[in-house]
Image: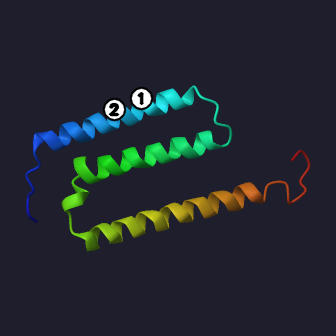
Amino acid sequence: MKEHIIPRKTYFIVWAALMSLMVLTAVLSRVNLGAWSTVIALGIAAIKALLVLLFFMHLRYEDYKLTAVVLFAGIFWMSILFVLSLTDYLTRGVTGTPGH
């Protein structure tokens, strides 16, 4: 594995972008955007997570095959958790047990 030397300027730019996105999130939390509030907040959070992953965790300079395998495994595991949680949530009250 090759080590990449990243200039400090890059880290400062990414940090400034993260701080700007944090301020944008705080400002937009005060604005009523209706149903779009959650969508926009999650979009900003995804951009912040992507910046952290790419630059601070150095995924930008890693082997893409290994990154793809780890990404697929994470999404697969998350989908298992969502499916199992949804099967529990969606079947509540179906059995007709008293008190439910």
Q: Residue at x 34, y 66 (%)?
A: 70
Disc 1 residue type (three-letter): Val
Q: Which residue is mark 2?
A: 19
In the image, residue 9 sits, relative to residue 90, either above or below, namely above
Across and down, in percent, residue 65 comes to 27, 74
Disc 2 residue type (three-letter): Met
Q: Residue at x 48, y 28 (%)?
A: 26
Q: Place residue 38 in its image quadrant.
A: top right
Give the distance between the C-alpha atoms of the residues marked 2 and 1, in whole angstroms: 6 Å
> Element under label 1?
helix
In the image, residue 39 sits, relative to residue 63, either above or below, namely above
Q: Place residue 34 in its image quadrant.
A: top right
Between 73 and 2, the residue placed more toward the observer is 2
- Contact flag, marks 2 and 1 (Cβ < 8 Å): yes
Q: Which residue is mark 1?
A: 23
Q: Is residue 25 left or right of residue 54?
A: right
Q: Residue at x 40, y 48 (%)?
A: 47
